[in-house]
Structures are given as C-alpha cells and as structure tokens.
Amino acid sequence: MDRETVESYASKKVAAGVCGIVIGSLGIHKFVLGKTQSGLVMLLFTVLTCGIGGAVMGVIGLVEGILYLTKNDNDFYRIYYVEGKEWF
C-alpha cells in the first residue's frame, strides 16, 4: 500500500464517518466513499417511505459512521477501497 494513497482516503474516512453519524438516513456517507448504488438505496428507502424508513437507515448510518471512524487508516483503505465492502 502506498502511504500517500492511504492518507488521501483518510480525509474521506472522517467525512463519511461524520455524515454517517449526523445524516446517515440519507446515505450521504455512501456517496462520499463512491458507493453510489448503496447511497441511492438508503436515500430512496428513506424518501419513498415518507421518512418512516429513515429510522432504520439512520441506525445503519450511525453504526457505519462509528465503524468508519474507529478503523485505522490502513484497515479503512483495505476494507472499503481494496475489498470494496459496501455495508457495515
């Protein structure tokens, strides 16, 4: 792993983690990581259920945000960029 590449994704880790915790029901944290399909699923589920599904998506976003922020930079890069993990 190139250290410069890992460090460039560290700022995305923080942005995605904070977005996941604050507005996780909208899936913005997924868009920050480039996971467009997962982000659309979360956003549409929240919108199409008139916000009722937002409670479920909010919990998922909160958990994912905490997971993002607690991983070290190397693990975060490996799990979410190299392996391409989408959920949790």
Image (cartoon, rainbow, N blue to C red):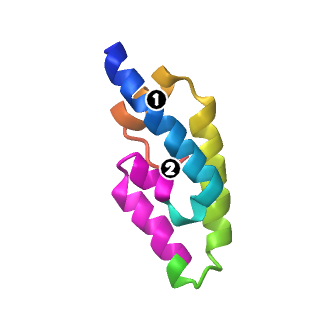
Q: Is residue 29 magenta?
A: yes
Q: CA distance from mark 1 to mark 2?
A: 18 Å
Residue in the foreground of this view, choosing between 45 and 18: 18
Residue displayed at 41% across by 27% down: 78
Q: Nearer the viewer, residue 47 or 88?
A: 47
> Does residue 26 show up magenta in the picture?
no
**Residue 75: where, in percent of width, then height?**
49, 24
Q: Which residue is mark 1?
A: 10
Under circle 2, the secondary element is loop
The residue segment tinted magenta is: 28-46
Q: Secondary structure at mark 1?
A: helix
Query: Does the rendering let one see residue 1?
Result: no
Instruction: Specify few, some or many for label 2: CA neighbours under 10 Å numbering under 14, 14-19, or 20 or more.
Output: few
Residue 42: percent from left, percent from top: 50, 66
Name the side, left or right, on which 6 lies relative to 27: left
Taking the spot 42% from the left edge, 37% from the top edge, the residue there is 80
Where residue 86 sits: x, y (%)? 44, 48
**Which residue in the structure is indicated by mark 2?**
87
Q: Residues within 10 Å of mark 1 (few under 14, many from 20)?
A: some
Q: Is residue 23 left or right of residue 48?
A: right
